[in-house]
Amino acid sequence: MSSLVERMVRAARLDAEVYEEVEADTHATGQAMQVVVLSSLAAGVATLATAGVTGVLAATVFALIAWYIWAFMTYWIGTRLLPEPQTKADVGELLRTTGFSSAPGVIRVVGIVPALSKLVFLIAGIWMLVTMIVAVRQALDYSGTARAVAVCAIGWGIQAGLLVLLFNLFMVGV
């Protein structure tokens, strides 16, 4: 079994095999959650001066909720709306693969340097999107990448709408 750091590096390098590995490893769900938390904390550290500790903690919880919603939406869209004949997956498989796709987000900690913040966040965002596409392609056993791009785009749009709704419901009057 691979270590967490080794899996994170392989995921960031777009190693399709690591996504197959964590997809099949039911014990890797905790590791996937750790990756999401580390990625979120890295982003939080970069914004510590403006967000404060409470903001960092809230952002981490928010990231975990967003990860679950996007993984569930990806599962549903990928297996119900846009499956290929060989597509077979469960929510756990998508949680594990998409969790590891957050690995490049750890570089956001470099954003603590104000002059680098925007560039680092842009690079991390694009990199995480690419790893998400690879993760979805592998988890849903797609023969190509185009369908994974479509699933990620649709899922992201629905997730973004749901998160805006949740944010507005829970942050009103705060």
Image: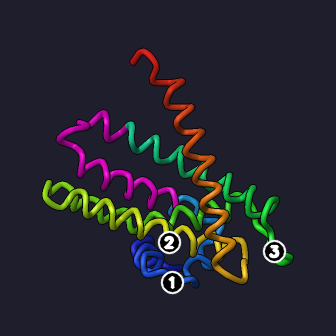
Give the crowd class for mark 1: few <14, some 14-19, many >=20 residues within 10 Å: some
Residue 82, by quadrant, is bottom right
At label 2, which amino acid type do we have?
Thr
Which residue is more in the foreground, 36 or 162? 162
- Which residue is drawn at the image coordinates 23% and 52% (left, top)? 46
- Which residue is drawn at the image coordinates 50% and 47% (left, top)? 64
Give the crowd class for mark 2: few <14, some 14-19, many >=20 residues within 10 Å: many
The quadrant of the rendering that contains the N terminus is: bottom right
The residue labelled by disc 3 is 84
Give the colouring mode of the picture. Answer: rainbow
- Residue 15's label in the rendered image is 1
At label 3, which amino acid type do we have?
Glu
Q: Position of residue 88 (x, y in %)?
A: 80, 70
Give the alpha-carbon distance from disc 1 to disc 2, as whole Å: 9 Å
Residue segment shown in magenta: 32-57
Point out the tag, 3 or 1, that comes first from the N-terminus: 1
- Residue 131's label in the rendered image is 2
- Residue 28's label in the rendered image is none
Give the crowd class for mark 3: few <14, some 14-19, many >=20 residues within 10 Å: some
Residue 25, by quadrant, is bottom right
Left or right placement of residue 43 versus residue 85 in this view = left
Give the alpha-carbon distance from disc 3 to disc 1, as whole Å: 22 Å
Mostly what secondary structure, the magenta segment? helix
Give the alpha-carbon distance from disc 3 to disc 2, as whole Å: 20 Å
At label 1, which amino acid type do we have?
Asp
Q: Residue furthest right?
A: 85
Q: Residue furthest top?
A: 173
Q: Is residue 50 magenta?
A: yes
